């Protein structure tokens, strides 16, 4: 996709420029046809430069040069009735046509200026935001999870997608969107990836997800990058490309489907844990200084179930769970009833 095709679009529910332009064209054509119809109906009151009567083509011609204020003068109203129609209808039609023409030009110029100012202001304020690459099912689910936990607001989410349909949908949902290919450095620059705190990669192809992850990590060495991969054999590629977390989406779904046939209640609990803002939720916190050396304790209505120590995960039924260390991250189940 060429550089000129990369576009930043802000949330909007207003009519599209194409629809607005179409409406103005319809008004202009309506004025033209109205004047042409009036001229032809009253053709006996009009004469051309040779004194001939006005035909249908002459009526359309007269309407076009009159409404556009060209006025060659080769067709003129000669009867009082025709002159009255010209004064009462044709002249106001000319004025309205000019308003539509000038108004369209001014609106286009003003809209471009406003868009340039909006992008400039947005670039200055956007920081510590979340970039979501791909606004499909996984991308929408990731955003809903972030919003449900209250960790981000819609203005802190930037969506990147190559599909105009997906971009329009995300824009209508209230997010700033970028129409472009996230594998290209310039597109991620447009999204201010250098200032982002997290990048969520939900591409349909594993090779695309790997390239997006590699490019994002090259531009931002500290951001959390969570990537979805369809095949488990490609998971290590994303990890080596810089992904902080890799989710094997196809296999995870398959495991849940298989578990649901044998233990549907367990799947229901897992679903509850995954859906933000409803029932129980997973949460994490750093180990407290007074916990170091002993087991993690329940705090802030959070029941500890695991410890993340570097790249290792320690479950609650392991002996190491009883002795926390500085730098550990406590993972627990949070509920308002605990």
Image (cartoon, helix red, strand yellow):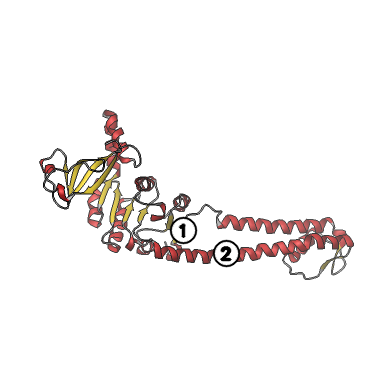
Q: Which residue is mark 1?
A: 9
Instruction: Give residue 129's position: percent from left, percent from top.
Output: 35, 57
Instruction: Give residue 83's position: percent from left, percent from top.
Output: 85, 63
For this orientation, the residue located farthest to the top is 262
Is there a contact, CB below 8 Å, between mark 1 and mark 2? no
If the image is split into quadrants, where does the C terminus sit?
top left
Q: Quick check: can you spot residue 158?
A: no
Return the residue nearer the eye: 142 or 39: 142
Instruction: Give residue 37's position: percent from left, percent from top.
Output: 78, 56
Q: Is residue 306 above or below residue 267?
A: below
For this orientation, the residue located farthest to the bottom is 72
Return the residue nearer the eye: 299 or 162: 299
Of helix, strand and loop, which one carries label 1?
strand
Q: Quick check: can you spot residue 110?
A: yes
Label 1 and label 2: CA atoms lie apart by: 16 Å
If the image is split into quadrants, where does the N terminus sit?
bottom left
Q: Which residue is mark 2?
A: 108
Of helix, strand and loop, which one carries label 2?
helix
Q: Residues within 10 Å of mark 1 (few under 14, many from 20)?
A: many
Q: Earlier in the sequence, mark 1 or mark 2?
A: 1
Instruction: Give residue 230's position: percent from left, percent from top.
Output: 30, 46
Q: Is residue 48 left or right of residue 250?
A: right
Return the residue nearer the eye: 254 or 88: 88
Asked where in the image residue 148 lies, by quadrant, the reply is top left
Q: Is residue 43 left or right of residue 102?
A: right
For this orientation, the residue located farthest to the right is 79
Asked where in the image residue 222 lies, by quadrant, the reply is bottom left
Q: Is residue 139 above or below residue 108?
A: above
What residue sits 75% from the left and 66% below the top? 65
């Amino acid at each position: 996709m060429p550089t000129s095709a990369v576009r930043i679009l802000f949330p909007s529910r207003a009519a599209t420029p194409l629809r607005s332009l179409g409406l103005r064209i319809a008004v202009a054509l309506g004025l033209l046809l109205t004047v042409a119809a009036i001229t032809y109906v009253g053709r006996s009151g009009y004469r051309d430069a040779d004194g001939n009567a006005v035909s249908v083509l002459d009526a359309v011609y007269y309407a076009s040069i009159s409404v556009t204020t060209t006025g060659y003068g080769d067709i003129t109203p000669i009867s009082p009735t025709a002159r009255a129609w010209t004064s009462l209808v044709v002249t106001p039609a000319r004025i309205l046509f000019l308003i539509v023409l000038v108004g369209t030009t001014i609106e286009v110029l003003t809209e471009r200026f406003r868009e340039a100012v909006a992008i400039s202001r947005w670039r200055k304020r956007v920081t510590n935001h979340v970039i979501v690459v791909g606004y499909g099912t996984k991308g929408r689910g990731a955003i809903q999870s972030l919003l449900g936990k209250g960790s981000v607001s819609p203005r802190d989410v930037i969506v990147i997608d190559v599909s105009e349909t997906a971009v329009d949908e995300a824009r209508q949902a209230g997010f700033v969107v970028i129409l472009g290919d996230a594998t290209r450095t310039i597109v991620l620059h447009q999204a201010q990836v250098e200032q982002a705190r997290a990048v969520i990669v939900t591409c349909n192809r594993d090779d695309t997800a790997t390239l997006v992850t590699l490019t994002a990590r090259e531009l931002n060495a500290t951001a959390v990058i969570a990537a979805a991969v369809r095949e488990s054999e490609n998971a290590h590629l994303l990890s080596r490309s810089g992904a902080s977390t890799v989710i094997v989406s196809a296999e995870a779904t398959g495991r849940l489907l298989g578990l649901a046939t044998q233990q549907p209640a367990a799947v229901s609990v897992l679903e509850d844990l995954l859906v933000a803002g409803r029932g129980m939720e997973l949460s994490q916190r750093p180990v407290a200084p007074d916990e170091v050396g002993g087991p993690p304790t329940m705090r802030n209505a959070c029941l500890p179930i695991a410890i993340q120590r570097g790249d290792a995960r320690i479950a609650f039924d392991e002996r190491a769970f009883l002795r926390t260390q500085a730098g550990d991250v406590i993972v627990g189940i949070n509920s308002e009833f605990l």
